[in-house]
Image (spheres, coloured by chain):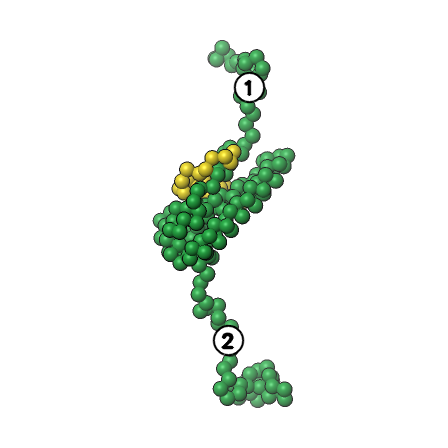
Chain colours: A green, B yellow
Amino acid sequence: MLPHLSGLRLGDSAVPTGADGEGGLTVGQREVEPTGALFRKSDPLAKFRKAVVERDDKKVEKRVYAAVANLSPNEARQLAAEFEQSAAKAWLGLRLVSAQEDYHKQRLDNVKALKALLEAHLGLGTLYKYDPNRSVAVLPTHAPRPARNLQVPPLAELRGQDGHRRVARLPHNS
Amino acid sequence: MGTDAWRDYRTIRDFWKKADDLVVDLWHRR
């Protein structure tokens, strides 16, 4: 036993708590352990947010149904507002990233911004499909598809003004 | 871009999964 603890009796606290330096609990006093988080009721909003981004197709429906059953109409509306707000934020983020000069240099940022937008839309879509309170009445408008993000020049530019092909004819093609 | 409503929930989910895969892919390729 350590020398500074040798004088302690069972039930004594190692840290002196009393004014006179005497440790231990008084009669009827309980030691308070920080165990509140273990018994706290889970947050239904957090449960829904987690269920929305479940990747496994087999599990997602079950999880979403369980999460939606816990939601009150008010909470569902709150979630819808939250997803709409993050969608608006993500649109802005996407515009800022795609304004960069080199798309390929910024590709990861671009895809991340797109994912954030799709995640917000997925939340709204999940509420649209599964929420019995109909907190989301219409599906949100399209996010740009990943493949469409590539800058494709219009056809007229490729062909030239006269409408003829500018690509040289290959020997086997002429 | 951004003018039509999504067709259904399933389409949004498919695109979200694609974007998620792409983020992981690009992250590892860096």
Residues B21 and A119: in front is: A119
Q: Position of residue A85 (x, y in %)?
A: 54, 48
For image coordinates 63% across by 37% down, the residue present is: A100
Q: Secondary structure at mark 1?
A: helix
Image-based side of B14 in relation to A1, left or right? left
- Please name the residue that numbered disc 1 is placed on: A156
- Please indicate, yes or no, whether residue A160 appears anywhere in the rendered image: yes
Residue A92, numbered label: none
For image coordinates 39% across by 46% down, the residue present is: A129
Residues A142 and A146: in front is: A142
| Quarter of the N terminus of chain A within the rendering | bottom right
On screen, residue A120 above or below A21: above
On screen, residue A86 above or below A165: below
Residue A33, numbered label: 2
Q: Quadrant of residue A66?
A: bottom left
Are the numbered discs 1 and 2 placed on the same chain, yes or no?
A: yes
Q: Position of residue B14 (x, y in %)?
A: 42, 41
- Is the C-beta separation of discs 1 and 2 under 8 Å? no
Image-based side of A128 in relation to B25, left or right? left
Using a 10 Å C-alpha cutoff, classify the residue at mark 2 as few (fewer than 14 neighbours), some (14 to 19) or many (20 or more).
few
